[in-house]
Image: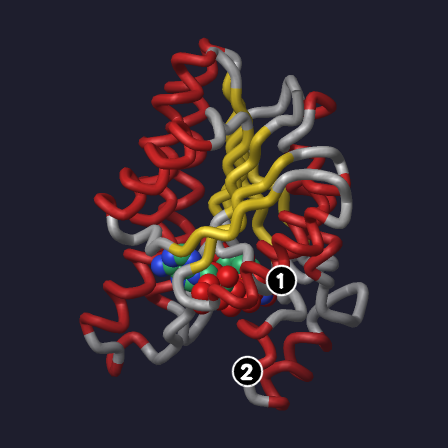
Amino acid sequence: MAKLAIVTGASRGIGAAIAKKLAAEGCDVVVNCVSSVEKAEAVAAECRELGVNAYPMAWNVADYDACKLAVNEIKKNIGVPEILVNNAGITRDGLLIRMKPEQFNDVIQACLTGTFNMTSLVGAQMLRAKKGRIVNLASVSGIAGNAGQANYSAAKAGVIGLTKTAAKELGSRGITVNAIAPGFVETDMTASLPEDIQEGAKARISLGRFGKAEEIAEIAAFLASDRASYITGQVIVADGGMAL
Ligand code: NAP
């Protein structure tokens, strides 16, 4: 029987690439988004072309009750997920002293609280099943900090702490929990950065270019597979040699 994967924020960018990569490896996939339902449907259609089942579903990962409803619905109608990829995230950049509380809180809610909500709810099902793989999208900003991203850096540092704690709590039942910390990756998130910031960033990257969503998807698929059975609580940095 095919493994079932939930990928949050899979309507675009890195999440869409991860959903398609997992589908290519034979997983059935729940393709989550918050509002781009048509895009999630298109990603699901691409997954189905690879011969698996795919289910576009919209819910807000920052909303615990919405997550609970979705996770229960998935269990009832599709099955218990063996793979959870907490990929959904947003940025609301601005300098610390000018950052509005809602700007800070929105990013914490989407990136960190969303990862907690889904890990807690799906983790409970994985514990009963005594198997599971959880992959969280962190960021190099969560390791080194980044001017203009106090909210995002704090959220992603929190994701790393959550990853390590979940790895310790869930490990005895064979569940692994790891994080990926990308640098700059070509998606809508980085396309909105001013040209000079993009060029300045590229100058600091050893490989001289931004990463591709598919390059991050390779790591997620590896961490979600049986090939990574003895890796847990780790943060894999994929930044083209930026943080050297
Ligand atoms: P993106 O292109 O902006 O796509 C974001 C995805 O998250 C979309 O599918 C969006 O759904 C979904 N989403 C946002 N808020 C959500 C919520 N509250 N509930 C459910 N889904 C939500 O982002 P990306 O660049 O692919 O980034 C994916 C992940 O990698 C994020 O966690 C990001 O922080 C991390 N990351 C990205 C980079 C980079 O350079 N791109 C670097 C480091 C880390 P809708 O389409 O419905 O809005």
Q: Which one is in front in this view, the residue at disc 1 or the one at disc 2?
A: 1
- As rendered, which of 126 and 103 lies closer to the eye? 126
Which kind of residue does numbered mark 1 sit on? Ala
Instruction: Identify residue for label 2.
Output: 193
For image coordinates 81% across by 64% down, the residue present is 207
Which residue is pictured at 68% across the width and 28% down the height? 225
Q: Is mark 2 within 8 Å of ligand 1?
A: no
Give the Cα distance between marks 1 and 2: 26 Å
Dot 2, how many residues are within 10 Å of its Cα: few (below 14), some (14-19), or many (20+)?
A: few
Front-lying residue, 44 or 87: 44
Q: Residue at x 69, y 49 (%)?
A: 47
Q: Categorize mark 1 by other alpha carbons within 10 Å: few (<14), some (14-19), many (20+).
A: some
* Above or below for 36 versus 200: above
Mark number for residue 5?
none
Is 29 in front, or is 94? 29
Q: Is residue 32 above or below residue 35?
A: above
- What residue is shown with label 1? 42
Query: Callout 1: helix, strand or loop?
Result: helix
Residue 39 falls in image quadrant: bottom right
The residue depicted at 41 percent of the width and 56 percent of the height is 58
SS type, badge 2: loop
Picture quadrant where residue 110 is located = bottom left
Q: Tell me the quarter of the picture where residue 163 sits.
A: top left
- Look at the image and tell me in which quarter the N terminus lies: top right
- The x and y percentages for residue 80 are 47, 25
Looking at numbered disc 2 in the image, what kind of residue is underneath it?
Leu
- Give whichever of 4, 126 is nearer the camera: 4
